[in-house]
């Protein structure tokens, strides 16, 4: 089974540069490129096409590339997932812009000029390697706080924003500390749910959403069975629920534009079951261990049933043996 083509959007307000990026992206195996000369056109494409990777200049006439990528990370577009790989490039890498891009978890930075070989390798690398991205609400809040000081040009507002970022970093460090045992060693973790190797639904966006769900449910499972603090367990539970919600949302959006009615009918049945299980997870009291363990067992069984034919198959490069 062939994967659906990867959709790559390139954005630059210099026509020659935009055409160069478009030409390179279109030649990458399995990729279909879209191009835009301004953020408005790019936004229209992101809204109607399920873009898998964004390449954007950071300095544009009108709305900046930073504004566009922050909207992507905030989940502003219906057809495009918020956690797609984003590659930023610029001829003038101002420190402030780079710092703000880092806040929105940009995947890579390229400095102009960039060669066709370098860009092609970057595209292929980021389509094949996942980066952990926070829920869209995290970036929406970040975007709002970033824009508020700019609108008022208030030094006190700038100070409050910096303090808020420091606190977020402290909270992240605290969560990491909670994953250490009493001797200060890293708590051993294992995958609760596992995505089969060389497997695909036939749709890159669905594969990514399912992998992300498996990762987040595994994180919840690990902090729960290792008796971490309630705040850490609740944080992982929220991420797992958000991952499930996004999978369901992406599937619903894609179903409206794709064929294979039998596949989508079966997938919707599985997602309805998942929605009910995740609703239980959102409400269960994590202090009631037996209830949580019983629910985790149901989720594991759901995963085992879902990661099997005919929903998921081996890629063409592999043999035709069934998935396990």
Image: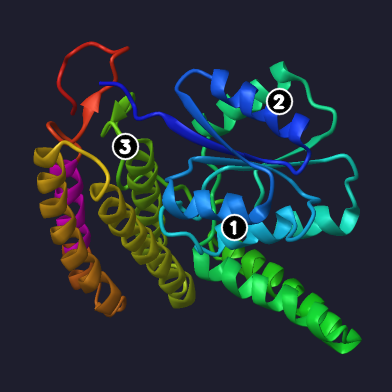
At x 51% / y 48%, what residue is drawn? 45
Residue at image mark 1: 183
Tell me, yes or no, if residue 185 can be seen here. no
The reply to whether the C-beta atoms of the residues labelled 2 and 3 are less than 8 Å apart is: no
Quadrant including the C terminus: top left
Q: Which mark is residue 20?
A: 2
Magenta residues, dominant SS class: helix
- In the rendered structure, the answer to whether residue 262 lies left or right of residue 41 reads left
Quadrant including the N terminus: top left
Say which quarter of the image contains residue 3: top left
- In the rendered structure, the answer to whether residue 248 lies left or right of residue 175 reads left
Say which quarter of the image contains residue 50: top left
Task: Please say whether residue 26 is one of the residues in the magenta stretch.
Answer: no
| 3 or 1: mark nearer the eye | 3
Q: Which mark is residue 254?
A: none
- In the rendered structure, the answer to whether residue 21 lies left or right of residue 77 reads right
Per the rendered image, the range of residues in magenta is: 295-306
Query: Foreground residue, 15 or 115?
Result: 15
| 2 or 3: mark nearer the eye | 2
> Where in the figure is residue 70, as x and y percent of width and height?
64, 61
Q: Which mark is residue 195?
A: 3
The reply to whether the C-beta atoms of the residues labelled 1 and 2 are less than 8 Å apart is: no
At x 39% / y 42%, what residue is drawn? 208
Is label 3 in a helix, a strand or a loop? loop
Is label 1 in a helix, a strand or a loop? loop
Is label 2 in a helix, a strand or a loop? helix
How many numbered discs, if any?
Answer: 3
Q: CA distance from mark 2 to mark 3?
A: 36 Å
């Amino acid at each position: 089974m062939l994967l659906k083509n990867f959709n790559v959007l390139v954005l630059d307000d210099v026509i020659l540069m935009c055409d160069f990026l478009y030409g390179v992206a279109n030649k990458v195996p399995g990729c279909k490129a879209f191009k835009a000369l301004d953020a408005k056109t790019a936004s229209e494409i992101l809204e109607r096409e399920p873009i898998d990777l964004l390449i954007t200049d950071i300095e544009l006439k009108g709305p900046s590339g930073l504004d566009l990528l922050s909207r992507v990370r905030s989940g502003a577009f219906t057809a495009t997932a918020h956690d797609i790989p984003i590659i930023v490039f610029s001829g003038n890498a101002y420190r402030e812009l780079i710092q703000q891009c880092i806040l929105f978890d940009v995947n890579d930075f390229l400095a102009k000029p960039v060669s066709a070989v370098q860009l092609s390798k970057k595209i292929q690398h980021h389509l094949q390697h996942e980066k952990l991205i926070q829920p869209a609400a995290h970036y929406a809040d970040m975007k709002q706080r970033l824009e508020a000081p700019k609108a008022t040009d208030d030094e006190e507002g700038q100070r409050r924003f910096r303090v808020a970022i420091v606190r977020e970093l402290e909270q992240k460090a605290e969560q990491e500390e909670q994953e250490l045992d009493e001797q200060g060693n890293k708590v051993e973790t294992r995958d609760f749910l596992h995505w089969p190797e060389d497997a695909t639904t036939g749709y890159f966006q669905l594969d990514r959403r399912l992998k992300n769900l498996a990762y987040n449910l595994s994180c919840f499972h690990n902090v729960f069975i290792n008796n971490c603090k309630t705040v850490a367990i609740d944080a992982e539970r929220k991420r797992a629920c958000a991952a499930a919600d996004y999978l369901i949302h992406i599937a619903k959006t894609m179903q409206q534009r794709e064929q294979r009615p039998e596949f989508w009918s079966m997938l919707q049945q599985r997602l309805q079951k998942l929605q009910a299980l995740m609703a239980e997870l959102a409400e269960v009291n994590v202090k009631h261990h037996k209830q949580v363990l019983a629910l985790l067992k149901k989720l594991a069984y759901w995963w085992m049933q879902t990661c099997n034919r005919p929903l998921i198959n081996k890629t063409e490069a592999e043999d035709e043996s069934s998935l396990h």
